[in-house]
Image (tube, rainbow, N blue to C red):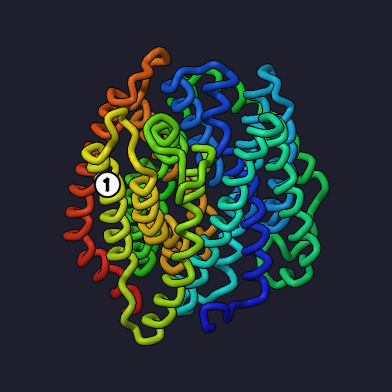
């Protein structure tokens, strides 16, 4: 039961994040198909539009982290972001093509204000050397998947039975519950937050941030209509973050320099993982629709629900990993974060190689048993816990307090740049609208999955040889 021994604010952050992710992943489970079926985009257009949208969401997270650290305070920024997100999902639920990009722009802004701040608050609940950090962030990651598991099952069912608008409206309700939960227990959070949280806030600052949010939302909606501009600006934003992070490494003292350098290298490794992660709502989603038997244990399901396998496995495995981290952490026998990242990438490689092998066991009609995608999601989900799930814990351990909010945002920036590349990779599986031959589509999907699996395996080998160097740099931090 030691894995449950955490400060009270942990549980408030846990459930707030769970409800926010309920809204986000409910929207994600529907959006790519919505763009394809309702907005009549082809596979490649829907993949790239969704990827640009996702990239923009995470590119702005650094801004939200900065606002939380220096302008509004972590908790106030979180609340404002949740309110804006709820509005964005509500507008998306209107099912109006003329409001599509406006709603997506609002969601980008709301997510940017919200996303970095719960993890920032969580990091402030523990000292740098607290052995509970890995377990805390693993359980926190479980909260993300608790919310997404429920919504990724409910949203497709509700959208199928009652229409797209009710599926997206469900997401808006999830955000309202997240904010209400946070406000009810706000008093328990009074000693947790950035320095700005302690001081009274000027209404002028709040109004200025709201006006800036409106302008940025309309700007995001504009560039999402022009993907070339979106990709250019997102690459530019990533370069700016890279330069700032590099300058912080250079100007830091010897002790902090090594910590920041290790965290920077692990962020680069995480880009590879997030390219793979981006396949779940895109190429893997369409593969499940086109070439996977839509049954689990003989029960027929909506193929969109296969996406829920990811949070399902994470929800099951997270407590086990959290217990192992705490058990071996107390004995100083836990694997280092670089080794955990390497194991995670190896499992992700296996997940895609499984999807290639499955073609040899397909039916004559090009349909594969759902057990293959279930196993694939298992491997990738454990890999996700070891990479993405520990990324925030890595920052909490290695990054100095003055850069915590910015670094949390920089971590999410890895998702931004990976989303763009992930969209390009997913587009390699583009299936022409008139192609209905399942045997041919199976060959297209599995060929791309083979290339992904082999590429990831090669990167894993490089990471394996690099890990001892990073371990030495981490261990030098206490010298």
Residue 449 in the figure: left or right of residue 378: left
Nearer-the-camera pick, 151 or 106: 151
Residue 43, by quadrant, is top left
**Along the line of sight, which residue is nearer the eye, 468 or 103?**
103
Which residue is located at x 71 percent, y 54 percent? 178
Does residue 216 appear anywhere in the picture?
no
Q: Which residue is at the front of the view, 318 or 197?
A: 318
What is the residue that sits farthest to the top in this orientation? 434
Is 264 on the left or on the right of 360, as rendered?
A: right
Q: From the viewer's perspective, is 214 left or right of 461? A: right
Q: Picture coordinates of residue 315 (x, y %)?
A: 51, 61
Disc 1 residue crowd, few under 14, some 14–19, many 20+, Cα 10 Å? many
State the SS at label 1.
helix
- Residue at point 62%, 64% (across, down): 14
Residue named by callout 1? 354
Occupied quadrant, residue 88: top right
The percent coordinates of residue 398 (x first, y second) are 41, 66
Residue 109 image position (x, y, % from top left): 64, 38
Can residue 288 be seen from the camera position used here?
Answer: yes
Q: Which quadrant of the figure has residue 98?
A: top right
Q: In this view, does 410 lie above or below 98?
A: below
455 or 309: nearer the eye? 309
Q: Quadrant of the C terminus?
A: bottom left
Image quadrant containing the N terminus: bottom right
Residue drawn 38% across and 59% down? 382
Above or below for 414 versus 215:
below
- Residue at image position (36%, 28%) is 424
């Amino acid at each position: 039961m030691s894995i449950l021994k955490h400060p009270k604010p942990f549980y408030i952050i846990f459930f707030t994040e769970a409800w926010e992710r309920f809204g986000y992943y409910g929207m994600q489970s529907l959006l790519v198909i919505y763009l394809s079926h309702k907005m009549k985009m082809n596979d490649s257009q829907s993949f790239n539009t969704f990827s640009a949208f996702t990239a923009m969401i995470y590119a702005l997270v650094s801004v939200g982290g900065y606002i939380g650290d220096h302008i509004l305070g972590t908790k106030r920024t979180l609340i404002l972001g949740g309110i804006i997100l709820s509005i964005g999902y509500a507008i998306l639920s209107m099912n109006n093509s003329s409001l599509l990009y406006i709603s997506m722009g609002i969601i980008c802004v709301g997510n940017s204000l919200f996303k970095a701040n719960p993890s920032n608050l969580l990091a402030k609940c523990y000292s740098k050397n607290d052995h509970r950090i890995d377990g805390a962030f693993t359980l926190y990651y479980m909260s993300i998947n608790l919310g997404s598991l429920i919504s990724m099952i409910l949203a497709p069912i509700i959208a199928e039975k009652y229409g797209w608008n009710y599926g997206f409206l469900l997401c808006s309700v999830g955000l309202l519950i997240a904010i209400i939960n946070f406000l009810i227990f706000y008093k328990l959070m009074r000693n947790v937050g950035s320095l700005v949280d302690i001081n009274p806030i000027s209404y002028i600052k709040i109004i200025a941030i709201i006006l800036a949010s409106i302008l940025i939302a309309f700007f995001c909606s504009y560039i999402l209509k022009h993907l070339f501009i979106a990709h250019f600006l997102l690459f530019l934003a990533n370069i700016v973050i890279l330069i700032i992070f590099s300058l912080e490494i250079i100007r830091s003292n010897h002790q902090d320099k090594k910590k920041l350098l290790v965290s920077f290298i692990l962020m680069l490794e995480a880009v590879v993982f997030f390219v793979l992660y981006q396949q779940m709502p895109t190429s893997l989603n369409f593969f499940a629709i086109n070439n996977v038997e839509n049954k689990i244990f003989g029960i027929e399901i909506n193929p969109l629900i296969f996406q829920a396998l990811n949070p399902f496995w994470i929800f099951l495995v997270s407590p086990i990993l959290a217990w192992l981290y705490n058990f071996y952490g107390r004995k100083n026998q836990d694997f280092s974060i670089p080794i955990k990242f390497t194991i995670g990438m190896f499992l992700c490689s296996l997940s895609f190689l499984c999807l290639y092998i499955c073609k040899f066991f397909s039916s004559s009609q090009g349909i594969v048993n759902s057990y293959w995608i279930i196993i694939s999601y298992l491997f990738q989900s454990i890999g996700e816990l070891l990479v993405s799930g520990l990324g925030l814990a890595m920052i909490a351990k290695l990054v100095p307090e003055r850069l915590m909010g910015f670094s949390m945002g920089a971590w999410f920036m890895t998702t931004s740049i990976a989303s763009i590349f992930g969209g390009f990779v997913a587009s390699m599986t583009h299936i022409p609208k008139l192609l209905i031959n399942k045997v041919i589509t199976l060959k297209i999907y599995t060929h791309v999955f083979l290339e992904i699996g082999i590429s990831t395996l090669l990167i894993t080998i490089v990471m394996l040889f690099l890990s001892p160097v990073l371990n030495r740099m981490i261990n030098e931090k206490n010298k």
